[in-house]
Image: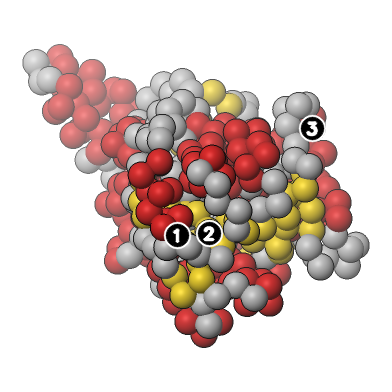
Amino acid sequence: MNTFNSKSPSMQAAAELGRRNFLKQGAGVVAAAAAISALPAGFISSARAESGEIVVGFITSMSGPVSSLGIPYDQGMKAALAFRSKVGDKPVRLIALDDASDPTNAAVNARKLIQENNVDVIIGTAGSPGALAIATVCAETKTPLICIANANPQGEPGNWTITIPQPAPLMIAGTVAHMKQAGVKSIGYIGFADPWGDLVYNALTEASPAAGIKVTSNERYARSDTSVTGQALKVSSTRPDAVIAGGSGTPGALPYLALRERGYKGQFYGTPAIINPAFVKVGGAAVEGLIASTGPVVVFDQLPDSNPTKAVSQEFAKALKATVPDAVPNAFSGYSFDAWVLFLAAAETALKTAQPGTAQFKLAMRDALTNAQEVVGCHGVYSFKPGSRYGNDERSRVLVKLEKGEWKLMA
């Protein structure tokens, strides 16, 4: 039976028996949990073994400041499950949890999914800080993570992670190329004071010198801030030809709104992290004409039929309409869908050598994910290799312009 809810199923039968035995002896909950975690690595319940069920944990932000991204992620996952809920003859059960936009909650949710639900893989979450927190837990427990936020964990956490969103250098290179062509000589920057803000700024400062563009500012703000007036004034004071912001979702609109309110008239640029309906609604007239790099799914109906991602995007749009009728494909729901496409491909490979619910299957899943080749999604064609979290190339990048509230493909 396939499920999509935030309630955890019962503990495995044998683990529950171990817990009861400890309770009979007067041990506390901590001792019981220790007994569960001490079960053999290859252990799975008889019911799980009989069904061959694959269990996927999904963490997103349905509440809090990152929910403008977390909700589209959730919509994309609902579409993904409707698209395909089996791998061969093996059923897939999805368990979804809300981290409330809190990295600590994200880590707690990951541990709960692994220890209590014995998930085979985790997909999540909406923000880079939360994703990095999950990656640490996944490395400790040797559980593969398909990251749907733009995060690049290093060391052992990176060895258990693949990242779906396009790397910042790839996407910023596309916008910088447009800046150069448009004659931009100076660019102001304002972004989140977190890993995503760092990724965008670093990519910008790496790409701009070769294009003859000077970065005039490096202003930061928190995702939970409600005003960036001070930062906007500092950016404006440097008199840049254009401004690019390293934010995401509705908080990502704040810099553009503040700059326009104070009379800034230069060109605005953006990143894939602001390509969602909530950003457009909040930004309104202030973000009209903004140019950004994004994945092809955002404008899939404007792509030529020869584009390899178009057919997958059409399948995604169909599944999304069936599950969330009012939603339209966007960058974030597309990331969830592509995470599922990669999960399906990896699970098919892993099933050839291991059984779901075992440590061997998790390892096989990790190896299949980190070695996936030419897997076509709606955001691009993915090829991974061990040691690199990203699997995208230029096929995952298009430039779009916001015209009358709609994203239009730029030639």
Mark 1 / mark 3, whichever is N-terminal: 1
- Residue denoted by label 2: 243
Identify the residue at horizontal 30%, vertical 66% (top origin). 155
Q: Is residue 398 above or below residue 126?
A: below
Q: Quadrant of residue 319?
A: top right
Circle 3 SS class: helix
x, y percent for residue 302:
86, 55
Q: The disc labelled 1 sits on which kind of residue?
A: Tyr
Instruction: Give 18 or 171, whichever is nearer the viewer.
Output: 171
Instruction: Find the distance from the CA under tag 3 to the CA under tag 2.
Output: 35 Å
Instruction: Give 338 or 113, whichever is nearer the viewer.
Output: 338
x, y percent for residue 244:
53, 58
Other-residue count near label 1 (Cα within 10 Å), few / some / many at <14 / 14–19 / ≥20: many
In the rendered image, the residue lying farthest to the right is 305
- Residue denoted by label 1: 189
- Residue denoted by label 3: 321
Q: The disc labelled 3 sits on which kind of residue?
A: Lys
Q: Quadrant of residue 333?
A: top right
Instruction: Give 3 or 211, whichever is nearer the viewer.
Output: 211
